[in-house]
Image: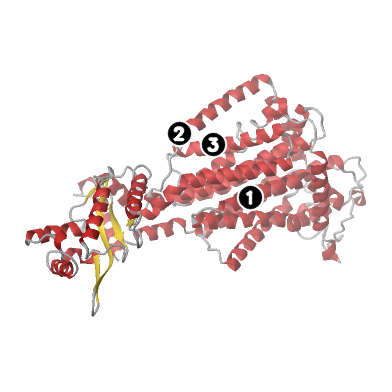
């Protein structure tokens, strides 16, 4: 009722405009929690719109407009349903294990949908590319095995990399980040599983429909794979020749052929020396941008960033910092019960020494009427007594007389418990004033001052018994997160890079390829970090920390896809291997990242600043993956001159064959038919 009343008055003043005598901003004790809940509350209508938009874009990418028989639009729904099943399993395990659900987890749905479709695009592209290794006598099972042996290894290891990054994120001391990473890691693992047991099955059915020479419109009704009267019923040994096609090569979707030619032409253009020199210059400028941005990066938590864009509390925080920041926060020094025996003058003297040491810090100053013991000393001196001479019951008597009279305002700061035989002290508190804050997150001067105050208290308490006194303020809960954000980001990125290094080393055992992958990944991450202060004028906070954790995993995905495709090429010359890589995975990368970006654009409809920052960071990461200075441009340059000439080697080739056969046999529904 209070907030409604204040909002009515504020609206009335706003209507008056410049003629209003003053402007009204306000807050209540519940404002922080209420605004944070409003800021992260999901709008399911937006997620429905997101799903429909992503599905429409995937249809535009996968379907053919000139040959409905070769079109692959029918597998879009199974690809999205695989993600839905994976998300459902993740929620289920979180519920069974008691992991708390955070509404911020809903933002992960955008990237999980993007990841699921990335894998689907890559598998479908591998299926299109498998026609060069197939004939009309190739069965459904063999065709799917060829596709999976190409895409399976790359998808497996990028899934492992993503899951590893999120598992590392679970070590975070921030509960919201930790629980978010648990959910995301489970989602990544289950997406990979459902790609095997669900999407692969749907793709096998679609291959069977194609081999029956049935267009996808009829196929969506059951023709070409369902039992009679639709039929012919699904058979993993079905061949294209069974439909009367006896050509030398299996036909491929015309749109795929067109895009492959364009990507190959792009690769040839990129390999020209003047273009390479221009790209090198752009890369140098981009890294200079990264260097400048990293020097201006700062961490913290601005309270108004926890609100929605048009929140009354955001206006209040702005006015508070603008008009009422001549003095800093009043923080409380709380002494736990039993830590100090105030009946002894030596203990009181020791306590006043602690107060003096704190006030001597450059960032702190004495607060008028902030220390109850000082006020009591003034009172006893005025009555002709000396506080230092009062011991035991005499001190208790003077204290009680003072609290009943002029010291009544301090009655809440001193807990005194009377029993039949004695009087004991509970917790007591005193107030000190901090210097003016440069930011309400305290990252500039508040957190360092808090650290120095705690160190001073720790030194004073050394050798004493009882609990150590603590300094408290309602904002300190945000400052605590500020203290660990930088170290947490550094630790997570370091561990994630080590994990990615180990997995990538197993996938691509070649030093140059490994180095280029790590440089390209670091370049993507550096650009995202630099954009935070330079482009958006933001600080690194808890919400952006979640985005950075995600960025580490997804940044390496497309780079590994390109590098793995380069290594898997059968050509012996570097330039030919590079052109093969761009032709095989260029389209899935463009399609997958475009889908992710379009999905993230739905977050623009939120007024929540948390979601908007998440959209900015994740969107920049997704766009950087195929930006002219990243995966499709930065990576090819070293490969042209220094890339590996040899292939993947027997270990990876064996893994590819095993994955291909396992995926194909799992997907062919033989057990279901039996």
Which residue does the image show at 64% across and 47% down from the upper left? 57
In the picture as drawn, the residue positioned furthest to the bottom comes out as: 420
Q: Which residue is mark 3?
A: 526
Q: Would residue 376 appear left or right of 461 to someone viewing this image?
A: left
**Would you call the spot at circle 1 few (<14 residues within 10 Å), some (14-19), or many (20 or more)?**
many
Q: Would residue 75 appear left or right of 407 to someone viewing this image?
A: right
On screen, residue 267 above or below 335: above
Residue 565 placed where, x, y %? 75, 38
Q: Which mark is residue 295?
A: 2
The Cα–Cα distance between marks 3 and 1, rounded to whole angstroms, is 20 Å
**Would you call the spot at circle 3 few (<14 residues within 10 Å), some (14-19), or many (20 or more)?**
some
Q: Secondary structure at mark 2?
A: helix
Q: Earlier in the sequence, mark 3 or mark 1?
A: 1
Q: What sort of colour scheme is used for the picture?
A: secondary structure
Whether residue 307 is visible to the viewer of this picture, yes or no, is no
Residue 71 placed where, x, y %? 76, 47
Whether residue 151 is visible to the viewer of this picture, yes or no, is yes
Which residue does the image show at 84% across and 64% down from the upper left? 671
Q: Which mark is residue 164?
A: 1
């Amino acid at each position: 009722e209070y907030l409604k009343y204040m909002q009515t008055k504020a609206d009335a003043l706003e209507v008056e405009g410049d003629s209003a005598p003053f402007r009204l901003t306000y807050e209540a004790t519940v404002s922080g929690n209420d605004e944070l809940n409003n800021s992260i509350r999901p709008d399911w209508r937006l997620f429905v719109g997101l799903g429909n938009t992503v599905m429409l874009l995937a249809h535009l990418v996968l379907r053919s407009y000139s040959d409905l028989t070769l079109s692959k639009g029918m597998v879009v729904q199974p690809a999205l349903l695989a993600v839905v099943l994976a998300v459902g399993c993740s929620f289920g395990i979180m519920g069974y294990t008691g992991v708390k659900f955070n509404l911020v987890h809903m933002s992960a749905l955008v990237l999980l949908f993007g990841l699921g479709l990335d894998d689907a695009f890559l598998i479908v592209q591998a299926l299109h590319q498998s026609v060069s290794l197939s004939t009309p006598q190739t069965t459904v099972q063999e065709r799917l095995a060829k596709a999976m042996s190409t895409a399976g290894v790359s998808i497996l290891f990028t899934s492992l990399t993503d899951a590893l990054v999120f598992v590392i994120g679970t070590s975070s001391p921030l509960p919201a980040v930790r629980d978010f990473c648990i959910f995301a890691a489970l989602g990544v693992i289950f997406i990979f599983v459902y790609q095997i047991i669900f999407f692969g099955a749907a793709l096998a059915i679609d291959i069977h429909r194609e081999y029956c020479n049935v267009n996808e419109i009829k196929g969506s009704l059951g023709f070409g794979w369902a039992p009679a009267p639709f039929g012919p019923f699904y058979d993993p040994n079905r061949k294209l020749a069974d439909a009367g096609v006896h050509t030398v090569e299996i036909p491929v979707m015309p749109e795929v052929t067109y895009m492959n030619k364009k990507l190959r032409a792009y690769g040839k253009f990129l390999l020209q020396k003047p273009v390479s020199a221009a790209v090198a210059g752009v890369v140098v400028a981009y890294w200079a941008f990264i260097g400048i941005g990293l020097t201006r990066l700062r961490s913290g938590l601005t309270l108004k960033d926890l609100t929605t864009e048009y929140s009354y509390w955001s206006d209040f925080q702005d006015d508070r910092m603008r008009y009422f920041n001549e003095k800093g926060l009043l923080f409380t020094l709380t002494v736990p019960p039993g830590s100090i025996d105030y009946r002894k003058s030596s203990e009181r003297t020791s306590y006043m020494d602690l107060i003096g040491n704190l006030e001597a810090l450059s960032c702190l100053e004495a607060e008028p009427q902030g220390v109850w013991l000082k006020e009591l000393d003034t009172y006893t001196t005025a009555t002709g007594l000396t506080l230092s001479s009062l011991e035991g019951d005499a001190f208790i008597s003077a204290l009680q007389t003072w609290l009943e009279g002029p010291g009544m305002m301090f009655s809440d700061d001193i807990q005194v418990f009377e029993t039949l035989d004695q009087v004991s002290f509970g917790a007591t508190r005193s107030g000190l004033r901090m210097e003016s804050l440069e930011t309400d997150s305290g990252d500039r001067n508040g957190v360092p001052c808090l650290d120095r105050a705690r160190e001073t208290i720790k030194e004073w308490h050394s050798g004493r018994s009882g609990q150590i006194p603590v300094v408290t303020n309602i904002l300190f809960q945000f400052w605590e997160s500020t203290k660990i954000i930088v170290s947490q980001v550094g630790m997570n990125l370091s561990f994630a890079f080590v994990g990615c290094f180990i997995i990538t080393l197993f996938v691509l055992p070649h030093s140059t390829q490994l180095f280029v992958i790590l440089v390209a990944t670091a370049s993507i991450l550096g650009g995202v970090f630099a954009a935070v202060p330079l482009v958006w004028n933001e600080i690194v906070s808890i919400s952006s920390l979640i985005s950075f954790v995600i960025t580490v995993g997804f940044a390496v995905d497309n780079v590994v896809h390109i590098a793995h495709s380069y290594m898997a090429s059968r050509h012996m010359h570097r330039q030919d291997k590079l052109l093969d890589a761009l032709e095989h995975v260029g389209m899935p990368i463009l399609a997958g990242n475009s889908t992710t970006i379009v999905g993230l654009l739905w977050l623009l409809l939120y007024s929540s600043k948390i979601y908007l920052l998440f959209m900015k960071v994740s969107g920049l990461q997704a766009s950087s993956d195929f930006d002219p200075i990243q995966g499709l441009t930065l990576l090819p340059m070293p490969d042209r001159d220094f890339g590996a000439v040899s292939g993947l080697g027997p270990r990876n080739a064996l893994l590819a064959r095993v994955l291909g056969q396992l995926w194909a046999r799992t997907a062919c529904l033989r057990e279901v038919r039996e």
